[in-house]
Amino acid sequence: MNKRVAIQGALASFHETAALEFFGEGIEIVECATFPQLFNSMKTGEADYAVCAFENAIAGSILPNYARLRNTNLEIFGEVYLCIEMNLMALAEQKLEDIEEIHSHPMAFLQCEDFLSEYPNIQLVESKDTASSAKEIKEHHIKHRAAIASRRAAEVFDLEIIAADIHDNKRNFTRFLALRRRNGELVKGINKASISFRSSHLPGSLAKILTKIGEYGVNLNKIQSLPVLGEEWKYYFYVDLRFEEFAAYRKMMDEIEPLTSELKILGEYQQGAKPI
């Protein structure tokens, strides 16, 4: 039986590409219109795994997904860094001067602001994902409309690319996390972990935690804070850690536990290959 993998978006989306890169061919894609639906598909058992975007090199972190992950029984067991190349596509024989509307995901618009600023008279319409924007043009044969999506979407939906590589930063990467239900099994080659916690409001409490992390040779790759809902001015910290020795990392976790509250390991996994 093929693995059922939930993604946000449709076939030919960047999420699908990331899922195929992580799991390989022969998976069954479970399309989810929104991120909440993706997490719910894991809760209901509709999907066995999920591949979910968490941050982009240009647009930054998708903050709500951190809270969604913390509040589930899911864990990270891998990651994929995907080069995001944005292309403007439309029906064959349509030219850029024919376009009156561009449809795409809000994140795509953020990543193509320089290009879009050159065409202030074209209306931008937000959609649930990049691939569905391309699919809708093809299915309904919509003229004077273009979509921002991947080159694969243009191929799958037989659209013509009328402007290629329109993203602002040519080093535009998105980090996708592979999620599964917690099962207690360790993956091979663990050298990275994602954790979350709350620190006390005592002076220097967060500094003490960060110092302990460094004492054990663990590198703090990222730290992000999100408000605790219903508790003003209190925060959860979300931290990515990189290490060479798993035992040293686990010892460090034992040391910082008394300094934190609600400490949770979101995942222990092997770092994904970062694009050069």
Image (spheres, rainbow, N blue to C red):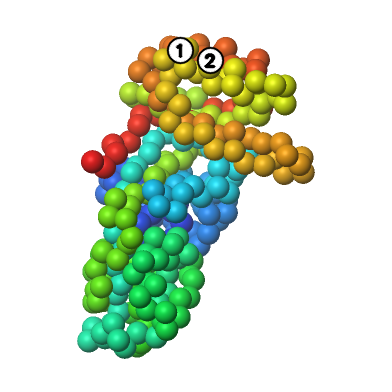
In the picture, measured across the screen, residue 153 lies left or right of residue 181, that is left
Quadrant (top left/top right/bottom left/bottom right) for the N terminus: top left
- Horizontal and vertical percent position of residue 266: 53, 32
Dividing the picture into quarters, in which one does residue 226 lie?
A: top right
**Residue 136 vs residue 217, the one in the foreground:** 217
Dividing the picture into quarters, in which one does residue 132 lie?
A: bottom left
Residue visible at 29% across and 59% down in the picture: 85
Residue under pointer 2: 212
- Horizontal and vertical percent position of residue 121: 42, 84
The circle drawn on residue 229 is: none
The circle drawn on residue 216 is: 1
- Residue 167 vs 21, above or below: the answer is below
**Residue 183 vs residue 143, the one in the foreground:** 143
In the picture, measured across the screen, residue 187 lies left or right of residue 54, that is left
Residue visible at 59% across and 28% down in the picture: 264
**Residue 154 vs residue 47, the one in the foreground:** 154
- Residue 155 vs 76, above or below: the answer is below
Q: Which three-letter amino acid code belongs to the residue tagged 1?
A: Tyr
User: Callout 2: 10 Å neighbours few (<14), some, many (20+)?
Assistant: some
Residue 11 in view, yes or no: no
Separation of marks 2 and 1 at Cα, in angstroms = 7 Å
Residue 223 in view, yes or no: yes
- Judged from the image, the secondary structure of the residue bearing numbered disc 1 is loop
Residue visible at 55% across and 47% down in the picture: 63
- Horizontal and vertical percent position of residue 201: 72, 26
